[in-house]
Amino acid sequence: SIPGFLREEGLAVRTELLDAGPESVKNERIPEKKYTKWLDYDTINDTIKLRRRLPGDYLLINPGCRRKKLKQYFIDEKIPRADRDRIWLLADGSHILWVVGYRLSEGCKVRAGTKRILKIQVWEEKEAGR
């Protein structure tokens, strides 16, 4: 749930909803961290889920929001086939909002007209004794 905290297979996720009004985050620079992303909350159509890849998944890859199949994105980025099923995805149906640790979809990037921001932080949790 948003805002909230989730643990999934050794991964921890914290979400926070921020107001993008003129007195809040408008003057802040969006952090360019690999495992913290800001998304335009109002562009999300369905329930977002943290999951692995499924057939039919796609990204919106340029400002014109051209679709690219997730499989093709993995090939273009030279992500080894053996690693592709282990990569976490933040998904809105088949639309991949964020390939965690890699790319954010153009369709959910924060822009000048953004009213609400979904801040997502992801990190690996180390098991006790390791």
Image (cartoon, rainbow, N blue to C red):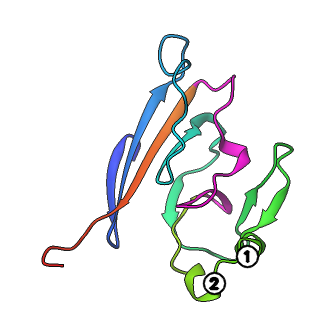
Magenta extent = 92-115
* Label 2 CA crowd tier, 10 Å (few <14, some 14–19, many 20+): few
Vertical relation: 129 (above or below) 66:
below
Relative to 61, 29 lies left or right = left
Magenta span contains residue 125: no
Residue identifier under label 2: 80
Vertical relation: 17 (above or below) 28:
below
Q: Image point 73% across, 76% down: which residue? A: 71
Amino acid type, mark 2: Pro
Vertical relation: 72 (above or below) 33:
below
Residue identifier under label 1: 71
Image mark count: 2
Q: Where does residue 106 sit, x and y in percent of width and height? A: 72, 46
Which quarter of the rendering shows the C terminus? bottom left
Amino acid type, mark 1: Lys
Give the distance between the C-alpha atoms of the residues marked 1 and 2, in whole angstroms: 11 Å
Relative to 15, 62 lies left or right = right
Magenta span contains residue 99: yes
Q: Where does residue 8 sit, x and y in percent of width and height? A: 35, 67
Q: Image point 46% across, 54% down: which residue? A: 35
> Which secondary structure dominates the residues rendered in magenta?
loop
